[in-house]
Image (tube, coloured by chain):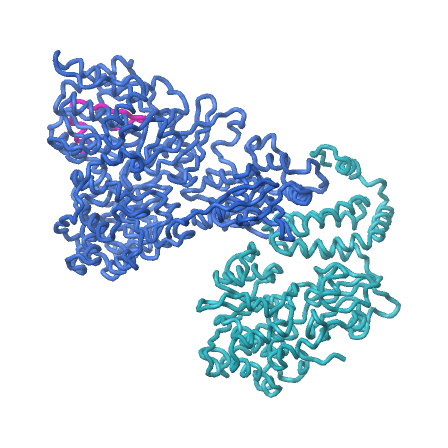
């Protein structure tokens, strides 16, 4: 059993109130941090090796150190727009232990020398927003927020902002635009938020879980924290397990334990008589893994090596009762719906992919369409303004490649069931594939 | 912000070593190595790149992912590849994606043949299409505005038009609705996109999604020719390219010139070409025959004009404006001064007095002259007594660009609320016509002697704001300040303006100075050519000064002038005080006019009307308000019997001179060609000396930047005697009348079918407080009266009009402020017109 760091007291009644939180040792890390020089807090963050828990897995301490020094307006923004399908860990954290996030944000802001901070929470998290509002008010009343906190030279304001329900606003620059009151479209990078973020000022943006881990790091000390997990994936991680498992939910695990232990040991695995067909290791945007990958250690590097990613730590399990075509189509539709439309490959690629998968689903496609689907995913990957396009292309591409036989069998089956003969698209398709001139649309 | 210094760096592109300016984006840097990188959304005129279309992906060594060349600045030693398999694949992909939803209706698309999407598909596309699904469908085409059609199926969502509306013209009307593949361009609530610069989005659109409604289906790119010239509908003198088919102008496009227009055109410049081919245009000479003007031969018209003018020798007044070229102004002043012994000629439309020559020389001194690009890089720009969007449209965009992109601090000091107020760091109001008191107050606030508060009271300006303005202007003493001032700043206020410039040390400072917005398109050129009452060619001194425009009107109305010569101006409309001008024209025994359209006054009083050339037909030079001489080049032939006007003026001179007694010296030869007229002008103006048409070329040349500028007659350097400004009428109980001339108040707008809907109407801008007091509401009809004159107008409530002042447009087809005043401060009474309620 993993030693719990974030979830140690998670089911303690009343933990969302400052009294219970403090009784459980809350805000002691803040007091300790404010007595340290900023550099020491930062050093602890660097030593901890903590990697961002939002999806990209970038070293948090390094991100803090990128912010320019000096007396300019700097911002800390907490990304609580937890919208990735399958991910619901931040929700539980904010709902049950909001002060852990608030405390983490104050320490992180102190390290980054930022005086204005924001929590951008997804609009659907209404209850969590109310809980956070209360927690912020309590922290203000207790003097943890405001001018010269606990007699130190650090002052900080914290504002909660509710989004309006767009997945793209979880992308950090889209989030910043939205927070500024604009249409939530991703910005071109560079400049990165660390240099020019919110209102053109240097901005540190981190995920809820990342910031909520900061008090623990200060409590244990950075290098002590780094002893958890593996060398490159330190610490513990909240994992949201969903899909065809018997005990879906959030689990805190030490990074590096075998994936099977999470899916079967903690979440109970699929129902009796069913078997894992595929699983998403890091949210719906991670390339899928198969049953044979279940023994891989669950950490950033092992997942990357297997051609996928740890992402936000959301494991979605799909068992053999589900058709992979449906999974792919459902995913593609989600990303088409959420594409902001700013850049070409994502806007057109997600749209086209859905149309092709629909034909596959209804049996109006040929196996050659699967080649086109795979090639369109390749054309999206790496060519977009932000990672939303890749977020569809990676899993769809991995499904089409790894489960090609099932796709082909499905097409045959549906075509036979529909009483269709040869697919009526084959003439233009043939022409297209054999390099005939364009313009011969059906 | 001073202009950044440019350093050259060396980088490698496709194996070639290329030198390019540091900081240039790779797309532009690549051009130095003759490498073209395809783009759709990239357009530097729109500001920072957005990297949305992904067409410009390139490979840069050391960076794992492909990068957008539009947003990656060139760096020393960078190694770039644009031809690798990976880059080709990305380019092919983006083209394929763009075509997924783009209809292939090129054969019936206006853009076909001049379409970047076609070109890039041909150059960088895969050449096959794999998409078999149905495309996106929209209703099409729709009216985005009366001027612009939108075809949303063709749109590739490059954001250019939206960025223009949001970040260049800042009218904030265009937005993207919805998201993802459902995105489409439109306005909130589907209101028409009507804005002074809206037409630019047609030119920005890289596909046929936004097309000009007047141009739709009129021509294909292989039917047309482009003819470069200069638009002379306002002092902006934007460089344009006329699209010509079969001797007809079908379209006007921008011809980017960073020193003049920055590549933008206003909608008047873009669509008023229709007036060139208006049915109403005069295309043959007209001569009075009893009560009517009748078409006549050139021979008859010329001899009638020559003999009538010859008879009126010593008693001829001339006013000019509109599209008059330097050459025409020069020839007419020579005709008047040397052959007709009359020095009464003027181009200045506002104010009662001519500007004294020493002041003119001081104001036009090369050392004090700001240029148009200076507006973009100054620390502070002060807009004084002018509304750029109405009076010199393209400057508005330049000022906004400076504020938005280069951190220029903008101050606006005008009587009337300005469109630039929201962009300004500081704006303040003073009473209409109170420039004298206001500038004296500003000078005092800058440290001169004088009582700021008393002077502010006289100007009805807020002393706190004036002091804040002074502070802003002298900030740190580092300020490159540009003062953009309009002709409404009356002659008596100019000494104070010069003193302010002196106190700010603007003279001789690069990037700082004064820039005048004259009221007619080529006013600067005409004044420098000698077409003004108190200076000859080259601002040379005259033994005796002639009459100014207003004095000409008064003298003619009084019977002291026998003949009036109207060169491209409709005085009742352009020069204010219409009743006085009507009397003047009625009283003068001879009225000779060059005009394109007949007015009631001409119909009744003209002796001879020569058909005027449109700017599309003209040959000659004009001088931009910042001193840039530019060439007008004929894009089309003359319609009907229209002749080159320089030749008409030369022929008149020949005929009038034939009456000169034998033996009198003939000081010059008459021009036989347009370029000869130019040469004579260049010889007559010392600071134009040595100019050739070749040197002016297609981009123009600022005379201040040539060696001959040394011949400019130096004026006094000041300080100048400011004089005693008079107090403005107090706002208690009476309403002060302020005037403005809308960009849409011109005959070219009224006769262009596409633009007609924008024609300016008599609108009275009233503050809510005054409206309350008078019991009038938005949209009410009212009468506005001053002394014994009355006009009617529609009430427009404007929240930011200062209480106690109302504003009424001038230069209208009918009514308006020109009927009430000559721009001289005046009070008016406003009364609601009784409306009969239908039973």
Decide: is A57 above or below B159: below
Residue A224: percent from left, percent from top: 66, 79
Q: Is residue A163 visible?
A: yes
Q: How many marks?
A: 0
User: Does the magenta segment cover residue B596?
Assistant: yes
- Which residue is farthest bottom? A23
In this view of the protein, which residue sits in the foreground, B481 or B427?
B481
Chain assigned cyan: A
> What residue is at 37 percent from the left and 20 percent from the top?
B638
Residue A398: percent from left, percent from top: 76, 55
Decide: is B317 above or below A75: above
Decide: is A271 above or below A219: above
Quadrant position of residue B654: top left
Decide: is B762 above or below A222: above
- Which residue is farthest top? B662
Bounds of the magenta span? B580-600
């Amino acid at each position: 059993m993993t030693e719990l760091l974030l979830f140690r007291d998670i089911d303690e009644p009343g933990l969302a109130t400052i009294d219970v939180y403090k009784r459980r040792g809350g805000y002691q890390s803040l007091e300790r941090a404010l007595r340290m020089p900023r550099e020491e807090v930062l050093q602890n963050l660097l030593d901890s090796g903590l990697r961002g828990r939002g999806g990209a897995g970038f070293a948090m301490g390094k991100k803090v150190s990128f912010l320019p020094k000096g007396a300019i307006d700097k911002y800390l923004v907490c990304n609580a727009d937890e919208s990735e399908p399958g991910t619901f860990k931040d929700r539980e954290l904010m709902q049950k232990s909001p002060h852990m996030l608030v405390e983490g944000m104050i320490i992180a802001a102190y390290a980054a020398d930022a005086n204005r901070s924001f929590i951008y929470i997804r609009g659907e998290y209404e209850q969590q927003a109310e809980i956070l509002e209360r927690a912020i008010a309590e922290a203000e009343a207790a003097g943890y927020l405001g001018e010269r906190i606990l007699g130190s030279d650090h002052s900080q304001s914290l504002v909660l902002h509710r989004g309006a329900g767009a997945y793209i606003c979880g992308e950090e620059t889209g989030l910043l635009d939205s927070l500024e009151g604009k249409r939530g479209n991703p910005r071109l990078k560079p400049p990165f938020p660390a240099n020019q973020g919110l209102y053109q000022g240097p901005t540190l943006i981190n995920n809820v879980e990342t910031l909520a881990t900061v008090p623990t790091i200060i409590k244990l000390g950075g290098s002590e924290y780094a002893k958890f997990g593996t060398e490159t994936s330190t610490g513990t991680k909240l994992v949201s397990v969903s899909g065809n498992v018997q005990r879906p939910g959030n689990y805190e695990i030490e990074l590096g334990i075998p994936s099977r232990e999470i899916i079967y040991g903690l979440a109970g695995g699929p129902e009796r008589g069913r078997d894992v067909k595929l699983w998403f290791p890091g949210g719906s945007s991670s390339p899928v893994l198969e049953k044979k990958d279940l023994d891989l250690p669950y950490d950033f590097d092992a997942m990357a090596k297997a051609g996928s990613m740890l992402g936000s730590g959301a494991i979605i399990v799909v068992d053999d009762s589900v058709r992979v075509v449906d999974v792919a189509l459902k995913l593609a539709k989600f990303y088409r719906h959420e594409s902001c439309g700013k850049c070409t490959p994502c806007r057109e690629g997600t749209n086209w992919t859905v149309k092709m998968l629909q034909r596959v689903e209804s049996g109006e496609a040929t196996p050659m369409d699967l080649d086109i689907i795979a090639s369109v995913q390749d054309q999206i990957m790496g060519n977009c303004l932000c990672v939303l396009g890749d977020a569809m292309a990676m899993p769809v591409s991995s499904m089409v490649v790894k489960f090609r036989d099932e796709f082909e069998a499905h097409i045959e089956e549906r075509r036979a069931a529909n009483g269709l003969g040869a697919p009526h698209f084959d003439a233009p398709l043939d022409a297209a594939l054999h390099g005939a001139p364009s313009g011969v649309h059906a | 912000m001073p202009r950044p210094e440019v350093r050259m760096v060396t980088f490698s592109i496709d194996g070639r070593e290329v030198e390019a300016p540091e900081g240039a984006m790779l797309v532009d840097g690549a051009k130095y190595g003759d490498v073209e990188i395809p783009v759709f959304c990239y357009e530097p005129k729109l500001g920072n790149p957005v990297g949305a279309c992904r067409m410009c992906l390139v490979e840069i060594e050391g960076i794992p992912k492909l990068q957008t060349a539009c947003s990656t600045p060139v760096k020393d030693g960078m190694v770039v590849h644009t031809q690798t398999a990976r880059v080709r694949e990305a380019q092919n992909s983006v083209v394929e994606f763009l075509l997924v939803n783009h209809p292939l209706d090129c054969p019936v698309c206006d853009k076909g043949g001049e379409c970047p999407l076609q070109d890039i598909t041909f150059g960088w596309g895969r050449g096959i299409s794999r998409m078999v699904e149905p495309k996106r469908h929209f209703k099409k085409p729709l009216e985005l505005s009366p001027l612009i059609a939108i075809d949303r199926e063709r749109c590739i969502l490059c954001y250019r038009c939206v960025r223009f509306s949001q970040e260049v013209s800042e009218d904030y009307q265009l937005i993207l609705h919805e998201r993802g593949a459902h995105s489409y361009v439109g306005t909130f609530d589907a209101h028409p996109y009507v804005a002074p610069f809206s037409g630019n989005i047609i030119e920005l659109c890289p596909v046929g999604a936004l097309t000009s409604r007047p141009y739709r289906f009129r021509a294909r790119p292989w039917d047309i020719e482009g003819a470069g010239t200069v638009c002379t509908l306002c002092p902006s003198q934007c460089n344009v390219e006329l699209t010509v088919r079969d001797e007809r102008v079908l379209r006007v496009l921008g011809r980017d010139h960073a020193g003049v227009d920055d590549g933008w055109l206003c909608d008047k410049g873009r669509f008023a070409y229709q007036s060139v081919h208006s049915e109403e245009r005069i295309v043959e000479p007209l001569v009075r025959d009893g009560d009517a003007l009748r078409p006549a031969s050139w021979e008859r018209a010329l001899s009638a004009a020559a003999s009538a003018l010859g008879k009126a020798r010593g008693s001829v007044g001339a006013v000019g404006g509109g599209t008059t070229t330097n050459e025409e102004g020069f020839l007419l002043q020579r005709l008047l001064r040397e052959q007709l012994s009359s020095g009464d000629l003027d181009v200045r439309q506002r104010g009662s007095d001519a500007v004294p020559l020493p002041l003119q020389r001081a104001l036009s001194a090369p050392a004090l002259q700001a240029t148009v690009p200076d507006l973009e890089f100054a620390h502070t720009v002060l807009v004084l007594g002018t509304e750029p969007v109405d009076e010199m449209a393209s400057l508005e965009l330049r000022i906004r660009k400076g504020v938005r992109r280069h951190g220029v601090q903008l101050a606006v000091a005008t009587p009337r609320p300005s469109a630039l107020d929201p962009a300004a760091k500081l704006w303040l109001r003073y009473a209409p016509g109170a420039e004298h008191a206001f500038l004296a107050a500003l000078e005092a606030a800058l440290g001169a002697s004088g009582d700021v508060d008393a002077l502010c009271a006289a100007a009805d300006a807020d002393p706190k704001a004036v002091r804040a303005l002074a502070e802003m202007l002298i900030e740190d003493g580092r300020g490159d300040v540009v003062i953009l001032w309009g002709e409404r700043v009356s002659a008596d206020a100019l000494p104070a303006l010069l003193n302010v410039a002196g106190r700010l040390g603007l003279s001789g400072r690069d990037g700082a100075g004064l820039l005048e917005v004259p009221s007619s398109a080529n006013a600067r050129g005409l004044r420098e050519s000698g077409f003004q009452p108190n200076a000859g060619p080259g601002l040379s001194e005259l033994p005796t000064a002639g009459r100014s425009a207003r004095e000409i009107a008064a003298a003619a109305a009084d019977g002291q002038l026998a003949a009036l010569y109207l060169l491209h101006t409709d005085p009742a409309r352009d020069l204010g005080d219409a009743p006085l001008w009507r009397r003047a024209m009625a009283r003068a025994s001879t009225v000779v006019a060059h005009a394109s359209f007949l007015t009631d006054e001409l119909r009744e009083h003209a002796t001879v009307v020569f058909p005027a050339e449109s700017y599309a037909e003209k040959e000659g030079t004009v001088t931009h308000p910042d001193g840039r001489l530019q060439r007008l080049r004929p894009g089309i032939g003359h319609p009907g019997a229209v002749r080159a006007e320089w030749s008409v003026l030369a022929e008149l001179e020949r005929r009038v001179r034939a009456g000169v007694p034998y033996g009198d010296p003939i000081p010059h030869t008459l021009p036989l060609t347009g370029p000869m007229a130019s040469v004579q002008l260049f010889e007559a103006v010392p600071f134009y000396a040595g100019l050739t048409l070749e040197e002016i070329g297609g981009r123009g040349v600022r005379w201040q930047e040539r060696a001959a500028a040394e011949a400019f007659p130096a004026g006094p350097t000041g300080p100048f005697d400011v004089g005693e400004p008079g107090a403005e009428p107090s706002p208690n109980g009476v309403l002060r009348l302020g005037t403005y001339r809308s960009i849409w108040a011109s005959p070219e707008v009224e006769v262009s079918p596409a633009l007609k809907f924008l024609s300016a109407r008599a609108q009275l801008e009233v503050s809510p407080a005054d409206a309350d007091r008078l019991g009038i509401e938005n949209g009410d009809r009212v009468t506005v009266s001053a002394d014994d004159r009355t006009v009617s107008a529609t009430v427009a409530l404007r929240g930011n009009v200062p209480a106690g002042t109302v504003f009424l447009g001038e230069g209208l087809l009918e009514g308006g402020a020109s009927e009430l005043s000559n721009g001289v401060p005046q009070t008016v009474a406003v009364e609601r017109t009784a409306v009969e309620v239908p039973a």
